[in-house]
Amino acid sequence: MSNNIKLMNNTFDLIKKFNKKFIFASSQMSNMTYSNYGILKNIGEKYSNILEGIIVKFWNVYGIEKDLSKSHVITDFIIKGIKKKKIDMLTNGKEMRDFLYAEDCCEGLEIIMKKFNQIKRYNKPVDLTTGKYTTILNVAKIIKKILSEKKINVSIKPSKSSDTVQKDKRNLPDRFFLRFWKPKYSLEQGIVEIIKYYI
């Protein structure tokens, strides 16, 4: 928490000094006050409103990850499927998430900066997301299906634990940004690209 606060102080001081247009990378968890991560994102949003930046709320961005020690759920499941032939899950998989492929995310951010003044709305964040929810168990099933088409047979082993990170709290994204941008990749198409890379 201390490092995050220092980072925000230094960054926002520079933005104020040079009066730059900027995007603050927030999260759909910024209203989840039981999470330190969510609280820090909320503080960053307060700074950003004062300095008139655009707050962009990321939901669950997934893509190719080079540092596998920091891999997130989709990459983690793919690596487990390829290497172990088994996706052993940390939860029962009933929790739902809204996933956005990294290439679509990058394109969305570029559009936000290019159309900054059209997109900026006082005190309203931009939700950069697909607006489509799916269960974590369904993600595992999609990966299993794609890997089976490549002759890699995978079993899925859900845990008995429930989600303790987001506690399956489902925020509803504001669909405003979909006037300017639409994701090109479905969840299955994004997963196919990642599997191609790791295989």
Image (spheres, rainbow, N blue to C red):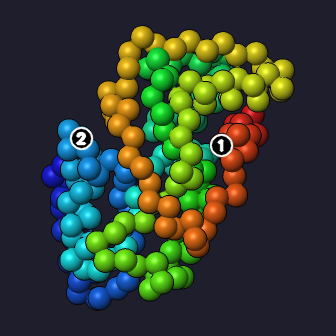
Give residue 141's position: percent from left, percent from top: 66, 24
Q: Residues within 10 Å of mark 2 (few under 14, many from 20)?
A: some
The answer to whether any part of residue 165 appears in the image is yes
How many labels were placed on the picture? 2
Q: Is residue 160 left or right of residue 183?
A: left
Amino acid on which the number 2 mark rests in the picture: Ser
Q: Residue furthest bottom?
A: 18
Give the spatial CA distance, label 2 vs label 1: 27 Å
The quadrant in which the C terminus is found is top right
Amino acid on which the number 1 mark rests in the picture: Leu
Give residue 71's position: percent from left, percent from top: 50, 37
Check disc 2 and report its element: helix, strand or loop. Answer: loop
Residue displayed at 21% across by 50% down? 39
Q: Residues within 10 Å of mark 1 (few under 14, many from 20)?
A: some
Residue displayed at 52% across by 82% down? 115
The residue identified by callout 1 is 187
The answer to whether any part of residue 12 appears in the image is no
Q: Quadrant of residue 14?
A: bottom left
Residue displayed at 70% across by 23% down? 144
Q: Dots 2 and 1: beta carbons under 8 Å?
A: no
Q: Is residue 175 left or right of residue 86?
A: left
Q: Quadrant of residue 192?
A: top right
Residue 94 to residue 98: above or below: above
Say whether disc 2 or disc 1 marks the residue closer to the N-terminus: 2
Give residue 188's position: percent from left, percent from top: 70, 40
Residue 45 to residue 22: above or below: above
The residue identified by callout 2 is 35
Residue displayed at 26% across by 44% down? 32
Check disc 1 and report its element: helix, strand or loop. Answer: helix
Front position in the image: 75 or 47: 47
